[in-house]
Image: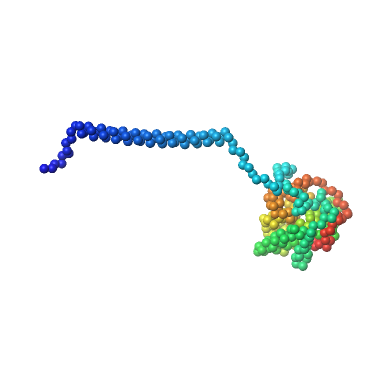
Amino acid sequence: MPTDRPPNHSPEQVEYRRRQEERAKRRKKRQMQKLMFLGACLVAVIVLVVAIVLVVRAIIKPAPRETRADTSVSTVSGTGPEADYPMAADPNAWNLVLINAQNPMPDGFSPELSEYVQNGVTYYFDARMLPELERMVTDCNTVEGHSLHVLVAAPGADRQNARYTGLIEAFRAQGHDEAEAEQMAREVEPPYGYSDHQTCLAVDFGTAEVTDTTQAFAETPEYAWLMANAPEYGFILRFPQSKSAITGITYQPYHFRYVGVEDARIIMQAGICLEEYVAQQPMAPPVVSDEVVSSSLPQDAAA
């Protein structure tokens, strides 16, 4: 008849089972110890590798990364607030021609000119830059409310000198003596042969509201557009307000000059003027001769 009592085991069987259980526990303990040892070894190896990398980095400095040589500009020490400023690789390039008080227009200077007709008036510019000028004016005027247009291009000798002498008379009428009036006029509109306009790469702009070359142009949206976009067409602000001591010309927000896209980007980004870019040191203005510099530029070019 079956009962609920556990079966009887002999002492030998009980002892055998106890020993089996102890062996299993010891095996499991050894396995755990082995796993813990391997884990500790792995951690130690990782820590050692990290320590070696840090020590090597501290001892051996990486060589400076090689940079691509800039073939367009170099850097020279400046004398103004900037410690250094970029310098043109080829200051004698046609698009960087410099005509100012220290660099009068050479005899026989004769770039190929093209006509720019605006509202029935013909203006003359260097043929190499005219497509970019036309594109810039067109793109500016696609903005609603903009009315950018040309006021001055490359005046002939008669027109240029008339502007210069007219300024002298205006300054004399304000009470300045002859020498002062001439100096002040040269800082606004130099006589023929000493003006940036004789490069045939310069342009004075106006708008529907600003119809003369005045500093009021700086308050127009067209001026803001030019300052943001002109370098992409190769143009720079030729006479910045902070560079009058170097250029010898007063601030002219309406006067822009073609120098080429790459050079324009460099000049405008660096905040320098053309004289600095072609590494011309500022000099005292020379005495301007009354003799007109010879040139084959058209004498009837629109002012």
Q: Position of residue 160 (x, y in %)?
A: 83, 58
Q: Residue at the bottom extreme?
A: 120
Q: Looking at this view, name the residue that lies furthest to the left.
A: 1
Residue 273 shows in the view = yes
Task: Classify residue 247 as left or right of residue 46.
Answer: right
Query: Is 6 or 105 nearer to us in this picture?
Result: 6
How is colour applied across the structure in the image? rainbow
Residue 169 seen by the camera: no
Query: What residue lies at 68% left-to-right and 50% top-to-bottom?
Result: 269
Q: Residue at x 66, y 62 (%)?
A: 143
Question: Considering the image in quadrants, where does the N terminus appear?
Answer: top left
**Total numbered labels placed on residues in the image:** 0
- x, y (%) of residue 38? 40, 35
Residue 260: % across, % down: 72, 54
Residue 122, given in percent of the width and then of the height, sits at 78, 64
156 or 19: nearer the viewer? 19
Quarter of the rendering occupied by the C terminus: bottom right
Please tell me which residue is depicted at 82% across the width and 55% down the height of the picture: 109
Q: In percent of the image, x 65 and y 45: which residue is there?
A: 68
Is 74 on the left or on the right of 57, as rendered?
Answer: right
